[in-house]
Amino acid sequence: MNRKLDTTIALKHIDVLERKLIRLKRDILHGLAVMKKSKKIKPSLFGSVRGGDVTEEMIEESKKNLFRKWVTSLE
């Protein structure tokens, strides 16, 4: 009788462990599916600007936009 009880308890423990493994696997797979992929680092700016060449005006406008807060705080 005692041996049957031990077997039943062992089977219940195995069942609990199986459920925990299934939940763990689900959580890991869910985490991988939801994980944001980081943007690829561009080695150059080639193809980042529409149209042909970058003009001096485009560079100056970009500088003004980039440093706008810094320049206005000095004025």
Image (cartoon, grey):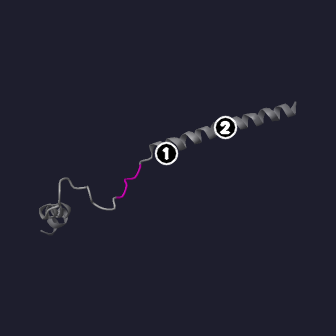
Q: Residue 20: horizontal and vertical position, in percent?
A: 63, 39
**In this image, 49 relative to 44: left or right?**
left
First in sequence: mark 2 vs mark 1: 2
Q: Quadrant of residue 7?
A: top right
Looking at the picture, which amino acid does disc 2 mark?
Glu
Q: Check disc 2 and report the residue beneath it.
A: 18
**In this image, 12 relative to 54: left or right?**
right
Q: Residue 13: horizontal and vertical position, in percent?
A: 72, 37
Q: Secondary structure at mark 2?
A: helix
Instruction: Check residue 32 in the rendering and tell me which mark sits there, or answer none.
Output: 1
Q: Quadrant of residue 11?
A: top right
Q: Secondary structure at mark 1?
A: helix
Looking at the picture, which amino acid does disc 1 mark?
Leu
Quote the CA–CA distance across marks 2 and 1: 21 Å
What residue lies at 63% left-to-right and 40% top-to-bottom? 21
Q: Of all residues shown, which one is farthest toward the front?
A: 52
